[in-house]
Amino acid sequence: MASDVDRLAGLIKSSNYTVVVTGAGISTEAGIPDFRGEKGIYRQLGEDRVMRIINIDFFNRHPEEFYEFYRQYFEFPPVTPSQAHYRLAEMEADGLIHGIVTQNIDNLHQLAGSKKVIPVHGTANVFICQNRKCRKEYPDDYVKNYAETVPRCKECNGVLKPDVVLFGENIKNYMDAREMILDARLLIVIGSSLTVYPLAGFVREFSTSFQDLVIINKGPTAMDHAALLKIDTGSTGQLLTEVYRQLK
Ligand SMILES: [Zn+2]
C-alpha cells in the first residue's frame, strides 16, 4: 500500500489538471448501500423490475405505485460523508484536484464541501414540481413529511419528481461531464466498476488519448487494462488520507 500511496501522490503532484470520477464504492464507505452490489436492490428484486418502476414512463403513468416503491427502497437513511469525501473536498480546496464527476445521487460530495461537482444522475435530496410553468424545488424533508404517498407542489398542486435520472431519461450535464473528463491530465476513478454508460464511455475515450488513468476500486473494473495505476481497496478513505498527508 505504501508504494501505491507514493505513486498516487506523485501523479497528483505532477498533474496540472486532475479530475475524479466517483461511483457507488465511495458512498458504501459512508454507509449507503450499493444498489448494484451483493445485497443491493437490483439483486434482491431483479433488475427488470427495478428498471420497469424507476422509469420515467412508469412515473408519469403510475405516480402512486412509483412513490410506494421509491419511498420503500430509495429513501436514504441520514448519513454523513465518508473520510474519502472529505479528503477530496480538501484536495479541491488546496488546488490538487479540479472537479468531480459523480454517478452518485446522495449529495455527499457537496455535503463534504466539494464545489465543482457534476452529478450526472442528479441528486436524490431535491424534488422538482413537474408543472413546466412552475418547476419549484423542494427539499427531501418536504417529501418525507408529506401526508400522502405522492408529494405535490404547495403552489400549483403539480406532482413532484425526484431530481434523479430515471431509466428512460438522459443523464444530466452530458457535455459538461464529458468535457471535464477529456480535459483531465490525470483521471482518478474511485469506486466504480466502469460498466455504466455513458460515463464508462467517457473514461474509455479518455484512456485512448492519455495514459494517466488511476483506478481505485474493490475488485476488477472494465478498464483495469488501461490504468497506469490500479489500487484494489475497500478503504479509499484511509488511502486518500495517506496520500493527502504526503501532498501537504
Ligand atoms: Zn408547482
Image (spheres, rainbow, N blue to C red):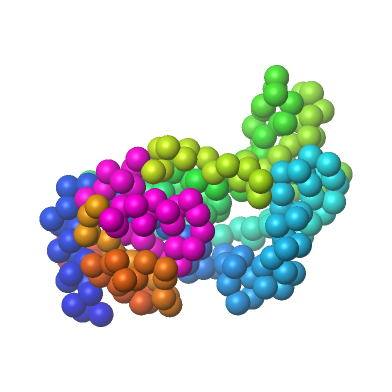
Position in image of residue 233 (x %, y %): 37, 76
Position in image of residue 138 (x %, y %): 66, 35
Q: Please identify the quadrant where the C terminus is shown.
A: bottom left
Position in image of residue 4 (x %, y %): 23, 74
Q: Residue at x 71, y 31 (%)?
A: 129
Q: Residue at x 26, y 48 (%)?
A: 184
Q: Residue furthest top?
A: 133
> Can residue 43 be seen at all in this image of the molecule?
yes
Q: Please identify the quadrant where the N terminus is shown.
A: bottom left
Q: Nearer the viewer, residue 69 or 186?
A: 186
Q: Which portion, as a residue range, is magenta?
A: 179-208
Residue 51: quadrant of the picture: bottom right
Against 81, residue 6 (above or below) is below
Q: Residue at x 45, y 67 (%)?
A: 193
Q: Residue at x 40, y 38 (%)?
A: 176
Against 137, residue 245 (above or below) is below
Left or right, 231 with respect to 15, comes to: right
Position in image of residue 75 (x %, y %): 69, 56
Q: Nearer the viewer, residue 92 or 65?
A: 65
Q: Residue furthest bottom?
A: 1
Q: Is residue 66 magenta?
A: no
Q: How many marks?
A: 0
> Can residue 239 be seen at all in this image of the molecule?
no
Q: Nearer the viewer, residue 64 or 56?
A: 56
Left or right, 60 with respect to 101, comes to: right
